[in-house]
Image (spheres, rainbow, N blue to C red):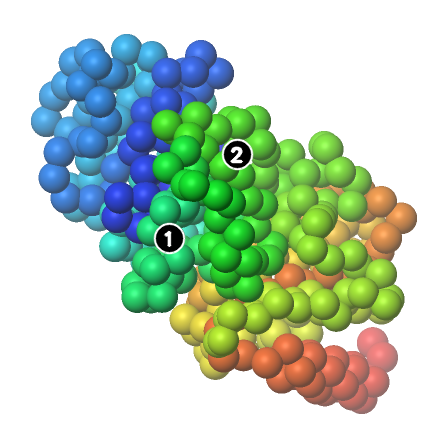
Amino acid sequence: MIPVTVLTGFLGSGKTTLLGRLLRSPQFSRTAVIVNEFGEVGLDHDLIETSDESFVELQTGCLCCTVRGDLVRTLEGILRRRDQGAVAPFDRVVIETSGLADPAPILHALMGDAGLVQRLALTGVITIVDAVNGFETLARQPESVKQVAVADRLVLTKTDLLEGEATDLVKRLAAINPAATVLTSSFGDVDADRLFDMGLDVAAEKNPELQPWFGLAETAHFGPATHDRSCHDAQISCFAILREEPIRAITLTLLLEVLAEHCGADLLRLKAIANVAECPGQPAVIHGVQHVFHPPAWLAGWPSEDRRSRLVFIVRNTPKAWIEVLLQALEAEVGEVTRNVPAA
């Protein structure tokens, strides 16, 4: 599987500067960059080696192209060229969105296309935030709030232009998305290892409890006294729901169906590891964005002694209590049906 990272951020936040700096690093050679916006490829000219109608070969061994139509077709085309040896054999994909873009449709494409999910694995979302203008941008531009809300990593850029600390902005970001790790960048320089240190596979290797993948390692602990912590930004909230007892597969399926139907665009992100009753030794990992859910990934075994189901939500206008009551109702209904089914 080829890992895919979505890079987003509002206009002028510094996405291209940061990306150009990263692509100069030897560790990021063999990267395919998809620029999902109109106009010319925005990378520095000294990175460019050759080009054809849509693909740009970079001196670092990377590949760049601008989406001129459907993103799915673009990804299918670049994978086909890779298989045919027509382009450099890239090891990762970075999709840079337009500054005004809602990143959700891109996540939908990566998670919902049957062909792509066999080849590409979404590792996470990086959102770039201008440390100088970010607070005002969040107040005026709803797109920027959503870009922050869906992020796994937040990068503060232009910190060299600040006279002091970006304390108010950091608090604002934490109010919108307490689950994201916040990094800083000056002139595009950032700790690349921490920036891309996300995704389920990385988390399973580095932390047996998978908390970095959930994004709550520093903001919440899944203990009985503290798991109810949540942080709110007006309409957006982040919280975790735990279940000590295994969840039946049909209950989990019904829960996701109801959430997709009734929450839709308000379900900004869902990450979960579930103890499915029918497969007690193999937890299911679930990743959802709005009404689209990635096919469950089944781990070979539990990464720790903690066998609780953990569902982490970032939602808008959706109370935690409503989801808890919904889950309880579905558990009760499925349990009643199961008890009334005659034994074979």
Question: Can residue 175 be seen from the camera position used here?
Answer: yes
Q: Residue at x 36, y 66 (%)?
A: 139
Question: Can residue 106 be seen from the camera position used here?
Answer: no
Q: Residues within 10 Å of mark 1 (few under 14, many from 20)?
A: many
Name the disc covering residue 134, or none: 1
- Residue 180 vs 228, above or below: the answer is above
Camera-nearest residue between 151 and 155: 155
Indicate the secondary structure of the residue bearing disc 2: helix
Point out the residue furthest to the right here. Answer: 305
Q: Left or right? Give the position of 263 relative to 33.
A: right
Q: Residue at x 51, y 27 (%)?
A: 192
Amino acid type of the residue tagged 1 in the rendering: Gly
Camera-nearest residue between 233 and 192: 233
- Residue 159 vs 342, above or below: the answer is above
Q: Residues within 10 Å of mark 2 (few under 14, many from 20)?
A: some
Q: Position of residue 327 (x, y in %)?
A: 69, 79
Q: Position of residue 234 (x, y in %)?
A: 49, 75
Indicate the secondary structure of the residue bearing disc 1: helix
Q: Exactly how many numbered labels are in the figure? A: 2
